[in-house]
Image (tube, helix red, strand yellow):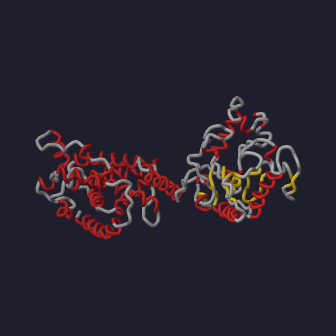
Amino acid sequence: MKRIFLWCLVAILFCGSLTVQAQNDDVTLYFSEDEMPNLIKCLPPPPDTIGTDFVNDIMRYMWGKQQRNDPERAALVFQDAVWNYDSLFAVFTVPFGLEISKDNTPEIYKFMVNSLSTIDATRVKPKAFYHRKRPFERFHEHMLTSYEEVELSGEGSYPSGHSQRGYATALLLSEINPDNADTIMARGYMYGESRVIAGAHWQSDVDASRLCAAIGVSRLHTSSGFLAQLEKARYEFQQQTGKLSPTDDFSQFVNILDVVPDAILEIRYYSTFNFVGTRVDGYLEPVALLTRQAADSLRAVSDDLKKQGYRLKIFDAYRPQCAVDHFVRWAADINDTLMKPYFYPKVPRDKLFELGYIAKKSGHTRGSTVDLTLFDMTTEKEVDMGGTFDWFGVESHPDYGGNPKTGKYKPNNRITAEQFHNRMILREAMLRHGFQPLSSEWWHFTLKNEPFPNTYFTFPVKQLNK
């Protein structure tokens, strides 16, 4: 028994050396203390010392003293007593399924530290308000972790800060790895029990702290910053544990506006003005994504065209497979003709697949295809290309009205010479910088050396927030 305690004490001293490093890292609070729920208003008061509830506290205190006789459980009490984030995260390594550290899992580490730092502050007011005497003080007995006594003496016992932090950790980690939620939450529950066994807290302190943790985590879910960082943490976990499907991996993609800041976005499939007539599946935000290589080449196109007085206007870029599946379902419903006058007045619905307007696989889904047009910086208007984006008809073909290879216009009653010339300005700039055209759509271009020629990605269109 003594040997175990000595080992634990050495571990505590070593972990204590990490405290300054872990607690002084830059922290971004999701809410100020005043913006978080006031736990004095949320919690019931602690049990009165003459009530039956306090009898349970005393019985659980006695139970805790018995648990100290179990060397393995006593060792966990010492481990759980260490008050720093690195030691806390180490406690959950096995149930979580991944070691958390600032260097190896920076997104998870940032998510946890920011979240816990925001929640931690909420315990201060009720502790000071109730100023409940701790068990070891009331009974004039030493704690199992006796080195804590000087620091804890005179500090309020209700609620338990350790238990709140441990249970909040379990709740947060369960959101990152829901498959292991049962074992993660079990360890979070034990973390609170350790404070009863140590003699630092009453059982009612610990019970209240679990409620405090749930209240805090619930509040965090109203923060857009918290939700964005949670997505990063989940993504990092999936990457590190091999659970991320290759088609869900967006690590090689970028937000187009981060690379081509002068581009104008009109993401049609995020809106209802498209041939489907509703927002398309998979478009969660009006952003445009491309592979890094395609975006870099598009930046070269933009720089080229700006010298000619134009900016790029983008209608679509990366398109997730679920969006393509949405198109296929729509095409099968021949009774849905809501947008027919605007996009396919002359094309029968049962011919959409045969004529190549709809397909079960799209080059957009590989991440290096973009649909775009020109924006005139002088007139501040979209350049007239003689037809709208996603017009289902031969008029959309690049060779309608002329020869794209020679740039020579062929008089016709649909596309003017100026409109054909405008199409050629866009086409030639795209070709100069590594893109290849599609024979049926003047607005559609794919990077020749696309990095993922055989991968059809599935992650949704939204801000990557890398």
Side of 37 relative to 305 (left or right): left
Q: Is residue 64 visible?
A: no
Left or right of 14? Residue 287 is right
Of residues 94 and 367, which is closer to you in this image?
Answer: 367
Q: Position of residue 365 (x, y in %)?
A: 67, 50
The residue lying furthest to the front in this view is 379
- The x, y position of residue 435, in whole percent, is 74, 60
- In this rendering, is residue 395 above or below 335? below
Name which residue lies at 75% across and 34% down.
Answer: 349
The image quadrant of residue 117 is bottom left
Q: State whether residue 108 is above or below residue 343.
A: below
Q: Nearer the viewer, residue 455 or 362?
A: 362
Q: Position of residue 121 (x, y in %)?
A: 29, 55
Res 43 quadrant in image? top left
Rendered residue at 80%/39% (across/down): 354
**Residue 2: image location, x then y, percent:** 22, 65
Total labels: the figure holds: 0
Residue under the image location 42 percent in, 64 percent down: 101
Q: Is residue 333 left or right of residue 244?
A: right
